[in-house]
Image (spheres, rainbow, N blue to C red):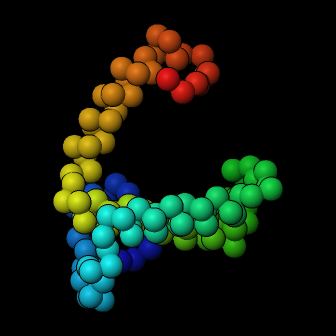
Amino acid sequence: MTSDQNDSEKTISFFKKEVNEFVQERNWLNYHTPNNLAQALSVEAGELLEIFLFKDYSVNDILKDQILKEKISDEIADVFIYLISLINSLKMDLTHIFQLKMNKNRQKYSSQEFNDGSFYKK
């Protein structure tokens, strides 16, 4: 994959296939259980969070600092890769579960009640 490709050119199926091939080529399927993948996803999310620990980066700070941006990008990609691998292991359809959850969110957090920028967990 070249760096000139972007989100508008790829589907979820592309990512699922790429991750699946990567895992199969390394014979990692036995290790890619839902439990292990959920744990790995949490670890990678923690590594992303660690970058921001005790820092107050603005978006501009991140965009100006190529090394910082690359570290963040790498961790975001790791989170995404493990999420896709978890979806693959559970044979889930991301579009379907996304749509179901967004419908629940629309009901739970109606635009009539949540229209001033405030948020609280319901």
The answer to whether residue 6 shows anywhere in this view is: no
Residue at 79 percent of width and 55 percent of height: 55
Query: Does 48 appear above or below 94?
Result: below
Q: Is residue 73 left or right of residue 16?
A: right
User: Which one is in front, 40 or 83?
Assistant: 40
**Please, which residue is most extreme toward the top here?**
112
The answer to whether residue 60 shows anywhere in this view is: yes
Where the N terminus falls, by quadrant? bottom left
Query: Does 103 appear above or below 79?
Result: above
Position of residue 78 measured from the top left corner of the image (x, y, whole percent): 48, 69
Position of residue 65 measured from the top left corner of the image (x, y, whole percent): 73, 66
Q: Residue 8's quadrant in the figure?
A: bottom left
Residue at 26 percent of width and 43 percent of height: 97
Q: Is residue 55 left or right of residue 95?
A: right
Query: Does 19 appear above or below 11?
Result: below
Position of residue 72 measured from the top left corner of the image (x, y, whole percent): 61, 65
Position of residue 61 measured from the top left corner of the image (x, y, whole percent): 75, 56
**Please, which residue is most extreme toward the bottom here?**
26
Residue at 36 percent of width and 20 percent of height: 107
Q: Is residue 94 left or right of residue 7?
A: left
